[in-house]
Image: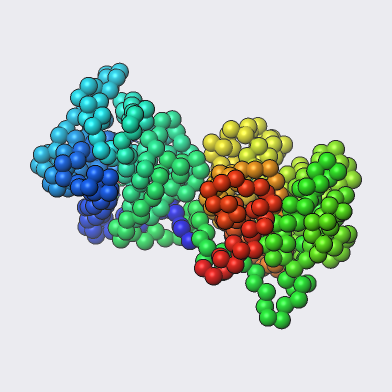
Amino acid sequence: MLHSWDAGAVRAAEEPLLAAGEPLMARASFALATRVASLLRETRGRAGGSRVVLLVGSGHNGGDALHAGALLARRGVAVSAVLTTERVHAEGLAALRAAHGHVLAVDHDDQAVPDAVAAALATADVVLDGLLGLGGRGGVRGPAARLVAHVAQARPRPVVVAVDLPSGVGVDDGTRNGVVLDADLTVTFGAYKPALLLPPAAAAAGRVELVDIGLAPAGPPAVARLEAHDVAALWPVPAPDAHKYVRGVLGVVTGSARYPGAAVLTVAGAVRAGVGMVRYIGSAGPQVLAAHPEVVVGDGRVQAWVVGSGVAPDDDEQRRRVRDALVHAVGHDEPVVVDAGALDLLPDAVPAHVVLTPHAGELAALLTARGEHVARADVEAAPLAHARRAHDLTGATVLLKGGTTVVAGPHGATYAQADGPSWLATAGAGDVLAGVVGALLAGRAADAVADPTLPAALAAAAALVHGRAAGHANPGGPVTAGDVADALPAVVAGVLRA
Ligand SMILES: NC(=O)C1=CN([C@@H]2O[C@H](COP(=O)(O)OP(=O)(O)OC[C@H]3O[C@@H](n4cnc5c(N)ncnc54)[C@H](O)[C@@H]3O)[C@@H](O)[C@H]2O)[C@@H](O)CC1
Ligand SMILES: Nc1ncnc2c1ncn2[C@@H]1O[C@H](COP(=O)(O)OP(=O)(O)O)[C@@H](O)[C@H]1O
Ligand SMILES: [K+]
């Protein structure tokens, strides 16, 4: 599992080490210089003789860049530091000067990037972004912002290495504030920060390399990302003496006369993820049976539910069945996945074993219906904040779908899963995901009710398997929702071997 800690927790972990005189910045900048030198060797054959430009802000992040620049200069790299404020890390600057690094500056009155700086950037093999790190508040401003815009527009673009974090991202909430310099590589110190896992900021980080500087952040992580072996530990694997009922029966109230395919796809997700049995309730029974003869159509006892995928707003009968299922599930402590056309039927307050699976537009509608006036673009700009707000307002576990899927549950349980190719953004893929989440909740229904943080972990596990299934179905190319479902058994088997 990848764990990330927010700025406060990282600083709290640093404090006693710094008080004890541990050379954290020296460790960080040495590791940074080493990574940049190997990057130069990869791209140019050797580090010596290459050109590196440092973008330097006022804090320790700039200090890291300056110290790393000094080390690179001593290895024969031509290093130029561009100071974006009058006050920069004094020791770092002295080290760079002592190593014969070149120092340039942009100042507040410069409306354009000065020629000498533009010239250094134009020939740079690598640009090190040391403007803002853990202490960044809001976007990069002033001359630094002009510099970032200049580098971002440069063609060809230099290789960009972010120091600790891409400057301008919201460290704890994963937002992008104004201009952000997209990095090819981020060398991060001590621990992942939430912005390195969360959308939309994480996309600015490029490849992330974590450097151990001896920190041990305490407390629960802010945001986690499951890996295959974590999913293996969560997956309900049938015991040798299992029968279909103990493996979990899933009630599925999805599809409508207008969207019968959604019923077929939710059921496909559930049966291919390995649920013991599906009971389907709704008008798409014939289509579901034609595709999945193992399904039982009609009422009966179940351990968990999936409701709402493809339920048209004008299908009064199916909406009544959804409402009945929701009332029954909440009243009998049965976990339930609430998707698409059921989101507007959600009771005011529900337990965490109710898992909502909206995309950004649906989450905006849900929040707006609860008086928040949120647009889809607001959700996309700050996915975690909005998913968490929906959890706070409803009590439900919230799985927010997108290129990176964010899950927010009780007690701060938060996951960010980025397992699928963008080909997964295809009609019906969400229906398959709802079925997979349902299968996991049915397989571990009692545990999911007893431990309110478990539904979030199971939802994240479903997102991992669903995303990987898209990649497995057709590596590097398009997939249909049905292909994704068909790939699930092999992907589950692979994950269980991890
Ligand atoms: N504290 C430590 O033990 C270590 C810190 N390290 C480095 O130190 C960094 C954190 O250093 P700092 O706390 O100095 O924080 P930063 O280097 O992120 O900079 C904070 C400074 O920038 C200013 N600032 C904040 N937001 C701004 C904005 N939007 N525009 C312009 N200026 C802005 C603040 O006034 C403050 O002076 C880490 O990211 C990491 O790179 C590493 O050296 C490892 C050890
Ligand atoms: N850019 C992307 N990259 C990877 N996966 C994506 C991307 N955009 C969406 N997805 C995933 O594709 C699925 C789409 O679901 P959804 O929007 O509900 O579609 P539908 O309602 O048609 O089923 C979700 O699992 C979502 O996480
Ligand atoms: K930075």
Residue 29: give x, y in percent of width and height: 24, 49
Could you say which quadrant of the image residue 249 lies in? bottom right
Q: Is residue 150 left or right of residue 441?
A: left
Of 330 and 211, which appears nearest the observer? 211
Residue 141 in sight here: no
358 vs 20: above or below: above
Residue 144: give x, y in percent of width and height: 31, 29
Residue 205: give x, y in percent of width and height: 40, 44
Residue 55: give x, y in percent of width and height: 27, 35
Rendered residue at 33%/52% (across/down): 189
Residue 6 in sight here: yes
269 vs 236: above or below: above
Rendered residue at 62%/48% (across/down): 479
Rendered residue at 35%/55% (across/down): 210
270 vs 132: above or below: below
* Residue lying furthest bottom: 241
Q: Is residue 53 left or right of residue 322?
A: left
Of 301 and 125, which appears nearest the observer? 125
Q: Is residue 17 left or right of residue 149?
A: left
Of 214 and 393, which appears nearest the observer? 214
Rendered residue at 75%/68% (across/down): 276
